[in-house]
Image: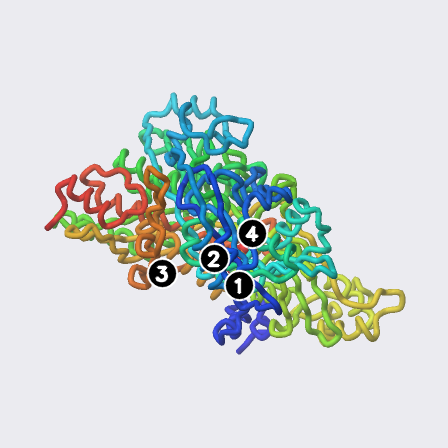
């Protein structure tokens, strides 16, 4: 029998995605689908050098090409005060260089033309003369006194950006001094790229009569972009409209403002015509949307019985030539200080130094809550390093050191307050599902036969849902989020939210929240977002913040509507409001279930028969400032087999038990986890970007940058535990990035586990077949 909740499509139901019919039928509306009358095109000239003075730009041949309308250079922008723009991390960044380039593929000039291909031909005809300078590529060398200076524009004449630390150094030193065992490891988490299916792009359209700039933009944060645009250009905010249509993947890479957006806007203001700019695939992979690049030294102190005591971490963060990551202002290294993870430590001290190098800006929060992937990788690897040193099972060591369920809310040594958790339950469930004890037996037998099999565990804690606004802001804009609901007379509703979907299914899940709270069917609820002229102000979608912030706002706005609706119900039922209760998705008189009205009845009355003296209508808005972040978690177990002839790592099984509190839509959550696991497995085994000593990118195409295909992707076995967040209105935590964060160390731990018997303690990612084969050779394990 279908329950009323199923009929409505409320919380906890796998409602089919409302957005899918349009995507499946090719009716999605992405940036490149937008065609405005009179639209012209932009393409970009990029630097072949990582570091060089520009001695001359000659645009005459390009300008002579029929169809080329203009060539914009840094000098043109400089005259308008727009050669530089602020970054979201309080640094500044070149829009176009006036006299010097600082990374390979940097924008040097823009060609504006009547056709896309004419613009591309024009790019070939712009003649730029460069005087190459020595680049600095290695962040350690960048800190040496005689290193080439990446940013002479700054007052500080070295490549150090900032130093940031968290935790207590003295307490940590004391805990290390009294510890019986200390393990230490250097870990490198290389630069990787987001590689969304849709590259970055925009259509900038300036209406000279209205004086209004409309930018259709692949952005995850339209409101914040509008505010920054207004502050930089002086155009009033009501004269700027940012529309973020369907987005073909964001994953953090579409939070920053890239130069192309600004140049296209300038070109439209100058010409009065709409200007389209779409990056091609090579530009996208070479110039923007880079993440990670952390060089980490971690030490973990413990007693011989396995009691973990303290963690010390020093990190060099390579940010490239501009510090353009989108981190909350107070956290230059993002939320990396959650690095103590799921474990009850006495003390921790974490230091991070940001460094400039001659590379494109890095540090985007690629499917992770501002550097949590790096933090989880560090602690999950270190726990395994310690287990190996002590000769104990990594599952037992984790069980011994977990923060216990009764210890929540738990204050971490670096200052976070975890809201809720039950780590032993998640790990027990994962171990039972995968058959851990049997796998260990199998591994011992295989090892005796010379076969290489490994089992890796990751029991991670995430931190998602920024705000609260008292601690979190980006460029001074406080981090909260919003929802506005309007119920129409016939009982349908429009819901506008401050966050912006990029494939997560918000049009479905946010409608489900309203369906649950108001008892209106999900198909009668339309969710809108991404247009700054209509959506309430929000900080955008990244870092799995939508459900914890705007999701909460949606529930609270619904409850505001329900409060008003209760008074209308009392009026309709001729009862005292105190005698009215919300039960089974309708209002009824207490003790008289037969006397009831539905929200549909009330919606009609709100416009036709509301009580005398009450305002007509049924709508509400909420700007939700969360009291804390939410802390989803999970237990992942990965089983690998290593081919001794090729070094290839095959993931034989991967069990993922996730806990994101109460779930809105189980099918969507499972989809988020499947995608996240694939995006977590990929950097562990395949993806990684490096530069040669001249700053040339080594993986500039998909021939060298290896994205996972169905061939490499195993069957993900998922399960869940449910530990609601005590402070979220319906007990949910974010989930979008959990799997990307939790998966990499599970894979690394499995590969190291397969080789632990010959003394391997760590392997840096990506663990490509060649890298693994070299290790096999070094330890006499290679075949063939
Ligand atoms: O900010 P973003 O949407 O990327 O991340 P999220 O808040 O973790 O949500 C990802 C998707 O999963 C959204 O459609 C959520 O509504 C859904 N979700 C859910 O159904 N239940 C949860 N407890 C958390 C997220």
Which residue is at 58% across, 55% downward? 264
- Are the residues tagged 3 and 4 within 8 Å (C-beta)? no
What whole-number distance in Å separates the C-alpha atoms at marks 1 and 2?
A: 9 Å
Q: x and y percent of residue 759 in the render?
A: 21, 37
Q: Earlier in the sequence, mark 2 or mark 4?
A: 2
The label number, if any, that marks residue 717 in the structure image: 3
Toward the viewer: 207 or 689? 207
Q: Separation of disc 2 and disc 3 at Cα?
A: 51 Å
The residue depicted at 62 percent of the width and 51 percent of the height is: 225
Classify mark 4 as within 8 Å of ligand 1 or not, answering yes or no.
yes
The dot on residue 67 is 1
**Residue depth check, mark 1 versus mark 3: number of the one nearer the observer:** 1
Figure disc tally:
4
Helix, strand or loop at mark 3: strand
Residue 413: image location, x then y, percent? 50, 33
Decide which of tag 1 and tag 2 comes sooner along the chain.
Answer: 1
Q: Crowdedness of circle 4 by 10 Å Cα count: few (<14), some, many (20+)?
A: many
The answer to whether mark 1 and mark 2 are in CB contact below 8 A is yes
User: For residue 509, which quarter of the picture?
Assistant: bottom right
CA–CA distance between discs 4 and 1? 45 Å
Label 4, on which residue? 545
Q: Residue 692's quadrant in the figure?
A: top left
| Residue tagged 2 | 122
Residue at the location (46% across, 48% down)?
A: 422
């Amino acid at each position: 029998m279908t329950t009323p909740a199923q009929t409505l499509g409320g919380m906890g139901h796998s409602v089919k995605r409302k957005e899918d019919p349009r995507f499946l039928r090719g009716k999605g509306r992405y940036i490149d689908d937008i065609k405005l009358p009179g639209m012209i095109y932009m393409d970009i000239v990029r630097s072949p050098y990582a570091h060089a003075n520009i001695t001359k730009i000659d645009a005459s041949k390009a300008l002579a090409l029929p169809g080329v309308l203009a060539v914009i250079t840094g000098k043109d922008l400089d005259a308008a005060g727009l050669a530089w723009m602020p970054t979201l991390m309080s640094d500044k960044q070149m829009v176009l260089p006036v006299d010097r380039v600082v990374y390979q593929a940097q924008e040097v000039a823009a060609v504006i033309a009547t056709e896309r291909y004419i613009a591309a031909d024009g790019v070939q005809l712009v003649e730029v003369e460069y005087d190459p300078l020595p680049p600095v590529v290695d962040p350690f060398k960048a800190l040496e006194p005689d290193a080439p200076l990446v940013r002479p524009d700054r007052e500080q004449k070295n490549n150090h950006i900032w130093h940031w630390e968290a935790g207590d150094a003295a307490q940590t030193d004391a805990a290390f001094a009294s510890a019986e065992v200390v393990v230490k490891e250097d870990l490198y988490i290389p630069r990787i790229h987001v590689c969304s299916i849709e590259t970055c792009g925009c259509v900038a359209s300036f209406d000279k009569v209205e004086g209004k700039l409309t930018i259709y933009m692949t952005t995850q944060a339209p409101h914040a972009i509008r505010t920054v645009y207004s502050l930089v250009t002086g155009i009033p905010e009501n004269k700027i409209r940012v529309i973020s249509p369907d987005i073909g993947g964001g994953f953090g890479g579409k939070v920053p403002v890239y130069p192309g957006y600004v140049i296209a806007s300038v070109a439209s203001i100058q010409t009065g015509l709409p200007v389209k700019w779409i990056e091609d695939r090579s530009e996208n992979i070479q110039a923007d949307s880079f993440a990670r690049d952390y060089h980490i030294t971690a030490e973990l102190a413990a007693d011989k019985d396995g009691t973990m005591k303290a963690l010390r971490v020093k990190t060099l963060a390579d940010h490239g030539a501009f510090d353009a990551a989108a981190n909350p202002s107070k956290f230059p290294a993002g939320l990396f200080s959650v690095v103590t993870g799921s474990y009850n430590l006495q003390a921790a001290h974490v230091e991070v130094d940001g460094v400039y190098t001659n590379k494109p800006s890095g540090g985007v929060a690629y499917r992770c809550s501002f550097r949590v992937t790096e933090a989880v990788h560090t602690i999950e690897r270190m726990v395994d390093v310690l287990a190996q040193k002590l000769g104990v099972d990594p599952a037992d060591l984790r069980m011994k050191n977990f923060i216990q369920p009764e210890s929540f809310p738990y204050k971490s040594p670096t200052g976070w307050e975890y809201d809720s958790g039950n780590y032993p339950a998640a790990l027990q469930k994962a171990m039972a599902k995968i058959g851990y004890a049997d796998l260990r037996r199998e591994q011992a037998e295989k090892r005796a036969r010379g076969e290489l099999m490994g089992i890796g565990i990751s029991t991670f804690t995430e931190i998602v849902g920024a705000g609260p606004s008292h601690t979190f802001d980006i460029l001074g804009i406080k981090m909260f989020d919003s929802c506005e609901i309007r119920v129409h007379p016939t009982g349908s509703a429009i819901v506008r939210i401050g966050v912006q979907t990029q494939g997560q299914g918000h049009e479905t899940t946010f409608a489900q929240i309203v369906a649950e709270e108001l008892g209106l069917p999900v198909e009668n609820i339309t969710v809108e977002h991404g247009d700054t002229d209509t959506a309430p102000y929000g900080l955008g979608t990244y870092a799995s913040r939508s459900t914890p912030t705007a999701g909460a706002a949606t529930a609270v706005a619904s409850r505001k509507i329900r409060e008003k609706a209760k008074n209308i119900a009392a009026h309709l039922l001729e009862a005292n409001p105190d005698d009215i209760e919300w039960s089974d998705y309708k209002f009824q008189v207490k003790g008289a279930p037969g006397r009831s009205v539905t929200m549909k009845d009330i919606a009609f009355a709100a416009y036709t028969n509301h009580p005398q003296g009450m305002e007509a209508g049924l709508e509400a808005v909420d700007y939700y400032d969360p009291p804390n972040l939410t802390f989803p978690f999970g237990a992942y177990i990965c089983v690998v087999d290593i081919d001794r002839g090729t070094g290839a790592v095959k993931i034989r099984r991967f069990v993922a038990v996730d806990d994101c509190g109460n779930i809105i839509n189980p099918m969507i959550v499972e989809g988020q986890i499947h995608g996240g696991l694939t995006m977590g497995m990929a950097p562990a085994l395949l993806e990684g970007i490096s530069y040669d000593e001249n700053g040339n990118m080594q993986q500039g195409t998909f021939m060298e940058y290896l994205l996972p295909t169905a061939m490499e992707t195993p069957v993900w076995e998922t399960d869940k535990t449910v530990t609601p967040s005590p402070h979220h209105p319906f007990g949910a935590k974010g989930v979008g990035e959990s799997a990307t964060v939790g998966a990499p160390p599970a894979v690394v731990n499995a590969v190291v586990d397969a080789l632990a018997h010959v003394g391997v303690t760590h392997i840096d990612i990506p663990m490509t077949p060649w890298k693994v084969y070299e290790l096999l050779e070094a330890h006499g394990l290679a075949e063939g």
